[in-house]
Amino acid sequence: MMKVLMLNGSANQNGTTFAALSEIGRTLEQEGIGYEIFQMGGGAVRDCIGCGQCSEKGCIFGDDDRKMPQEGENTGNGTISLVNEFVSKAKAADGFVFGTPVYYAHPSGRVLSFLDRVFYSSGRNFAFKPGASVAVARRGGTSSSLEVLDKYFGISQMPVVGSTYWNMVYGRKGEEAVLDAEGMQTMRNLARNMAWMLKCFEAGREKGIALPKAERESRTNFIR
């Protein structure tokens, strides 16, 4: 079964962002697509410093929030960094949804630090997999937050999944978010579009359609 990995970028694990992602998940299951909501939780998250010491496992730093490995994961020391756990799951995922609460008309700083490290160390694991971002707010700032998160897709050769409105939900608490009828409708349509795209890609693979080859020789740092 194909699977969508969703990131809850809120420190509140059962708040408004979780409510939006859960609505997507329920609809994905109706379409025959599995899903998992990855919880960042409330621990500190280190910024990416561009050190270039990334490995196949992901980011070299593991001194922020750490979790016990899931079944089948062997880290040697009994723990795995939050970022690298997500990287491990991303390798097997077929699609992605990044959810964030809105702080000062912007995604949470934590989710951006997290995704910077994920994509800097392991962006190749996201290529040609569809992605969507979701922003949840009490009132304003959702559009600018979506624009920030969508930029990860554009630089990583990821098709972007849309809906019938911008992917936003309104509410201060989880029980308020589910009352946003249009927002929940947008989440369901987003899920259906994601499922349709995944099935189209699978059909293409079965027909032997090759992925496009990217040119990477030119790196223009300045123009005289």
Image: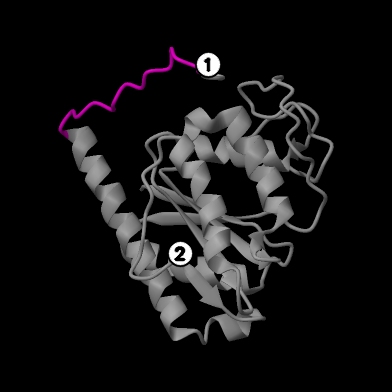
Q: Which residue is mark 2?
A: 25
Q: How far from the left and from the top, in percent, is residue 127?
A: 42, 33
Q: Main secondary structure of the magenta part?
A: loop
Judge whether residue 94 can be spotted in this image: yes
Which residue in the rendered view is the most extreme toward the front? 224
Q: Which residues are magenta?
A: 207-220
Q: Is residue 37 left or right of residue 182?
A: right
- Secondary structure of the residue carrying tag 2 is helix
Q: Nearer the viewer, residue 218 or 102?
A: 218
The kind of residue tagged 1 is: Arg
Q: Which residue is mark 1?
A: 224
Q: Is residue 114 left or right of residue 65?
A: left
Mark 2 is surrounded, within 10 Å at the Cα level, by few (under 14), some (14 to 19) or many (20 or more) other residues, namely: many
Q: CA distance from mark 2 to mark 1?
A: 50 Å
Question: Residue at the spot x=74%, y=62% of the render?
Answer: 11
Judge whether residue 6 can be spotted in this image: no
Q: How far from the left and from the top, in percent, is residue 123?
A: 53, 32
Q: Is residue 30 left or right of residue 57?
A: left
The kind of residue tagged 2 is: Gly
Q: Is residue 213 above or below residue 193?
A: above
Q: Is residue 80 above or below residue 6?
A: above
